[in-house]
Amino acid sequence: MLPDVQYPGKMRSNSRLAALNLRLENLGTVLITALAMCGVTVVGIVDYLTGYEISFSLFYLAPVSMAAWYSGRRAGVAIAALSCACWYAANLASGSEYSHPAIPAWNALVRLGYFLVTTLLLASLREHLRTEQQLARIDGLTGLHGRRSFEDRLEHDIELAQRHRTPITIAYVDLDDFKAVNDNRGHAEGDRVLATAGRVIRSSVRQTDTASRLGGDEFALVLPETDDRGARQVVTKMVSDLLAAFEAGRWNVGCSVGVVTFFNPAVTATQAVAAADALMYEVKRGGKRAIEFRVVPGVAAPPAADR
């Protein structure tokens, strides 16, 4: 099997397309719709100038598609109707002759149907894609970030911590004896444990923090601009709330937690998670149901008095 080679030209092309897509996403529906209207006007003028012998119907699809994809179904339908009207006006103004006066109206309706089908298909595809992206980034059971979203946000937060030389804390949480709940009381009860854990963890962090379910009964936290003292306060209270919620649900479940704080981190996202994961497994091997904290000084850690 040949290796998957990424050629520089292809990578640059993909990067440019991604940048263009991001710019269009950031314009907003109103501006996108206005640009689509301008596009229809330009195509209509060119359609009129070239005369009825040269068909320009295909070019109306560009503004129709842009409106449907970035502004939604309603904007797409409106631009489709405008495109049909422009084609009809350009066709009549160019002096084309037909054997029956109803023919241009029929042709306009056919084009309208073509534009509408394209609009509805693109709008439906876009909605489906957004739903899939949301499901991929948010865990449906707990409401926490999924693994992909967690990794993206962690990479971003580590880059900021490196740039501004601020601390960042990673906490890895594993539920102890969770398998016994699934085995003895069923998977539905296990799902209730996970949903409860997600609710407590979500309520324990700030909006700037990242709380994620990485899979199974494993969770992770990213606490930007949080030193070891702040991490100890947040994680200790969170575990206390988790144990109280498990006790209220009559679930014999505990937590093993590894918490690593990096000052001026010279690590990758993968290395940071691996460090917290390894520390969590040390807790497991030491008897479970405990929290272990560790500080990684980095290149230039602040003095102990400043922490």
Image (cartoon, rainbow, N blue to C red):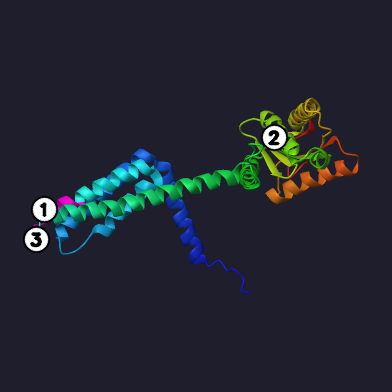
Write down the quadrant of residue 43 in the picture: bottom left
The reply to whether the C-beta atoms of the residues labelled 1 and 2 are less than 8 Å apart is: no
The region drawn magenta spans 87-98
Q: Residues within 10 Å of mark 3 (few under 14, many from 20)?
A: few
Residue that appears at 46% across and 61% down? 13
Residue that appears at 62% across and 43% down? 153
Residue 154, percent across and down?
65, 44
Look at the image and tell me in which quarter the C terminus lies: top right
Reading the chain from its start, which is encountered first: label 1 or label 2? 1
Any mark on residue 135, and which?
none
Q: Tell which of 166 and 38 is nearer to you.
A: 38
Q: Residues within 10 Å of mark 2 (few under 14, many from 20)?
A: some
Any mark on residue 99, and which?
3
Q: Give the residue at mark 1.
A: 93
Horizontally, residue 74 falls left or right of residue 88, namely right
Q: Residue reaching furthest bottom?
A: 1
Q: Which secondary structure lies at badge 1? A: helix
Q: Residues within 10 Å of mark 1 (few under 14, many from 20)?
A: few
Marks 3 and 1 sit apart, C-alpha to C-alpha, by 17 Å
The reply to whether the C-beta atoms of the residues labelled 3 and 2 are less than 8 Å apart is: no
Any mark on residue 195, and which?
2
Residue 227, percent across and down?
73, 33
Q: Residue reaching furthest right?
A: 286
Question: Which amino acid type corresponds to the residue marked 2 in the rendered image?
Answer: Ala
